[in-house]
Amino acid sequence: MDFLEHPLFHIGGQTITLISIIVFVIVFLLVLAVSRLVRRILLKRVFPRNEVNDGVARSITRIINYFVLVIGFLIALNSAGINVSLLFAGGAAIMVGIGFGLQNIANNFISGLIILFERPIKEGDFIEIGGKMGTVVSISARSTKVKTNVGIMIIVPNSYFIEKEVINRSYVDKTQIEIPVTISHNEDFEKVKEILLRLGNENQYSMKDFPPSVTFSEINELGILTKLWIWIVDQDMHSVIRSQINYRILQEFKKEGIKFPVPKRDLIKD
């Protein structure tokens, strides 16, 4: 059995043998099992019993899981006879070199912890990033998965949520969406306004307690820019509602003879 004690390599002035590797693996596997058990107990018993929000429960569980894994890793090293303090001291130069090479990964990992602690977003939130809308499916150590309304999964680095602007539409109970419409200068604005308000009220997703409104936004050389504003609760139906109302606008304008402005083109004759 001497081969178990045979030196394999050295780290930070410490000798690593086969038996130390075996002990490390066994202890760390036990840590993984304990971590999985703690996560299951929290998600299946503790949090449901205390009526903790699902997104909050998953965030707290993930933080606890990271903590258990880090502590367990250190315990596994110590159980294998490896002095952690000496290992860090002896491998400081190596760690600095690795740190420079893994800056991006470290940045995303730390950003992930910030997201879990500050919770600007959480699982289940309906958000808008880079002009795309979707639901946060999961937040991991390095990235966050966002599923769009058309079923596309976007994997976003966690640092994006810390450094860039992100619209979280689940932060509020209701939100207002705008639907711009440009009409010709000679059209009856009051008539257009009446049609838009009617279409806003008739939509099944618009809030009946908060009536829609129409604003006279801008007059330019092309025509008159108006905007229909409606309040909605179902944040993930944002694109669907906009599409439905735009379709009804086309139908009603055609029925009432209301025309959209056509850009003028100057023809150059030889």
Image (spheres, rainbow, N blue to C red):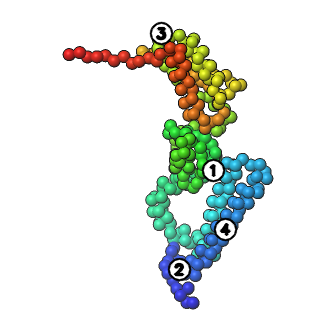
Under mark 4, the amino acid is Ala
Mark 2 and mark 3: Cα distance apart in space: 88 Å
Q: CA distance from mark 3 to mark 4?
A: 73 Å
Instruction: State which tag comes first along the sequence, 1 or 2.
Output: 2
N-terminal of the pair, mark 2 or mark 3, is 2
- Res. 34 mark: none
Looking at the rendered structure, the kind of residue marked 1 is Leu
Separation of marks 1 and 4 at Cα, in angstroms = 23 Å
Nearer the observer, disc 4 or disc 2?
4
Query: What is the quadrant of the N terminus in the image?
Result: bottom right
Image x and y of residue 52, in percent: 74, 49
Q: Separation of disc 4 and disc 2 at Cα? A: 28 Å
Mark identifier at residue 116: 1
- Determine if residue 179 is in view: no
Q: Position of residue 122 (x, y in %)?
A: 63, 46
Task: Tell us which disc is closer to us: 1 or 2.
Answer: 1
Residue 94 lies left or right of residue 197; in this view the side is left
The residue labelled by disc 3 is 186
Identify the residue position indicated by label 2 in the image.
Answer: 15
- Please state if 157 lies on the left or on the right of 26 as rendered: left
In terms of depth relative to the viewer, which is nearer, 72 or 131?
131
Q: Residue at x 48, y 55 (%)?
A: 103
- Count the marks: 4
Q: Give the vertical position of 35 relative to 160 (above or below).
A: below
